[in-house]
Image (spheres, rainbow, N blue to C red):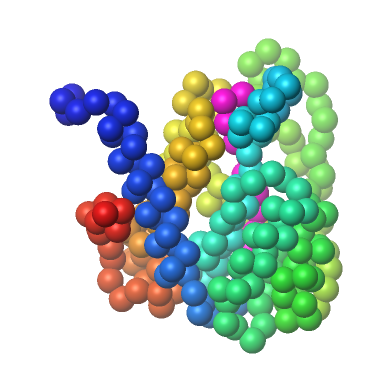
Amino acid sequence: MTGIHQDTICRLGVRVGNAGARVMDEQMRGLTCKTIQMDEIWGFIGKKQKNLRKGDEARGLGDVWTFVSIDAETRMVPNYFVGKRDSYSANTFVSDLAERIDSERVQISTDALAAYVDAIERGFGSDADYGQIVKTFGNADIEGQRRYSPAEIVRIRKGVVSGRPEWKHISTSYIERQNLTMRMHMRRLTRLTNAFSKKLENFKAAVGLHFAYYNFVRFHKTLRMTPAMAGGVTNHAWTIRDLVEAAQ
């Protein structure tokens, strides 16, 4: 279609994606976010964790988790981190977020992942009001194609972990909607396809490009501006050209 070799286009995609990651790192500083929601979204590189052979994990193959934060007021994504679903990744992700926020105090909501408790204490100390949403899922037998349907939620419970979070703001609704946006925008996160990433480098570039585009280029229908504009990071909407030029 373009007359340009596929590898050339892929290399450009990685360059632009890495530039998007740099834009996120450089621009998402000195933020005034006050209500943060966090979650992690699953993907895999090359093959799923259960199918790994000896040496595969050292090559970056297997399950990969993207930790994401979102400001509930502006829908802006202050930061993200690609890694494993473990304490190291949670600590790195939360510590990075804490360095980017200048608010005197912040309210944080997460799911029940145990690693968040220690990570938030390490990253924010006593300057965070932290609440969790704990969901209990049913384990009904689902056969055939229906085995891919999400499990039924039988109970949702809110809980205070530390500080004095406002009860009505203990929620993960916006970050869960962001997870859907990621799966819709990034084909490599779409379930039950062969579009998964074959290289970790390419996956990270795709994630960087997605969040740079989401924050700076894409107009939010409710806000009627980009999330970065709503968050006071920039005073204008960027273009795709701006992201491509950032890679040069």
Q: Which residues are magenta?
A: 36-47
In the displayed structure, does residue 169 sit left or right of residue 12?
right
- Give 45 or 108, whichever is nearer the viewer: 45
Which quadrant of the view contains residue 98? bottom right
> Residue 42 at x, y = what percent?
63, 39
- Give 52 or 37, whichever is nearer the viewer: 52
In the displayed structure, does residue 161 sit left or right of residue 244?
right
* Residue 64 in view (yes/no): yes
> Residue 243 at x, y = what percent?
30, 55
Residue at 72%, 71% (x, y): give it: 123
Q: Is residue 165 above or below residue 138?
A: below
- Give 248 or 166, whichever is nearer the viewer: 248
> Residue 73 at x, y = what percent?
52, 71
Instruction: Name the chief secondary structure element in magenta.
Output: strand
Q: Was residue 43 drawn as part of the magenta stretch in this picture?
A: yes
In the displayed structure, does residue 183 sit left or right of residue 14?
right
Q: Is residue 91 above or below residue 30?
A: above
Q: Was residue 24 drawn as part of the magenta stretch in this picture?
A: no
Residue at 49%, 40% (x, y): give it: 201
Outermost residue toward the left in this view? 3
Which quadrant of the view contains residue 129? bottom right
Quarter of the rendering occupied by the C terminus: bottom left
Which quadrant of the view contains residue 105? bottom right
